[in-house]
Amino acid sequence: MCLADLHNAKSALRLLNEHLSHHKYDLVLCAGDIVSRPNKNGMDFLKEFINIICELHQTKMFMVHGNNETGMMIDLMRKKNVLIHLREKRYKGYKFFGIGGWMEDLTTPDRLKKSLNNAILLTHIPPKRPPKAPSGSRVNSIEGGPLVHLCGHLHAPGAIWRIGETLVIKIPTAMYGEAAVLEMPGRKIKFIRL
């Protein structure tokens, strides 16, 4: 299951808890902005979010921070072993890599190429869509690019596009009761209501 942009919506936590009571997933991926700023209850909300997924429903989670999480919140994610910002993790034969926060341009610096190669990339900010190719031409693949790029931030319905061979999935907004389910292998995506 893929989530993004809860923005302190208690209704989204309630829907998520109910959904996970009826559906079992191998892994939850979260593209950040669990909270909104300023918010005096943000840390409690983040703790409750992690607890619902990892403790109550015993589901593994990888996540990145968005542009609203504070340094203390990022530290909590790290302490709970769910943060994959600039880290590579492996799970069930797949490589995951995350880039959290504000990323204006998600080009692939040389130092990241190895981590991105055949990975499932999780970012908060989506990549720029490539310009439309002229009829009959093809957009070249980024050699060593990710298999799938999951992202959030836009507060919009789910969307799918390609950059070369990479399938880019804009995760729908969880504060509106929406999420996505990614099936691997096959890179099949389904947008769902929680």
Image: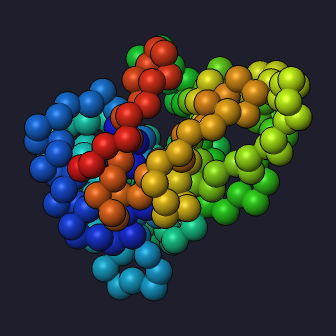
Q: Position of residue 178 (x, y in %)?
A: 33, 53
Q: Nearer the viewer, residue 87 or 190?
A: 190
Is residue 31 shown to the viewer in this render?
Answer: no
Is residue 95 shown to the viewer in this render?
Answer: yes
Q: Is residue 21 above or below residue 177?
A: above
47 lies left or right of 186: left
63 lies left or right of 113: left
Which residue is painted at 43% across and 31% down in the image? 189
Image quadrant holding the N terminus, namely: top left
Q: Is residue 122 above or below residue 71?
A: above
Q: Position of residue 146 (x, y in %)?
A: 66, 28
Q: Nearer the viewer, residue 68 or 169?
A: 169
Q: Position of residue 124 (x, y in %)?
A: 57, 54
Which residue is painted at 37% across and 41% down in the image? 191
29 lies left or right of 121: left
Which residue is painted at 67% across and 33% down in the image? 162
192 lies left or right of 95: left
Residue occupying the far front of the picture: 135
Q: Nearer the viewer, residue 34 or 78?
A: 34
- The quarter holding residue 97 reads top right
Which residue is painted at 67% across and 63% down in the image? 102
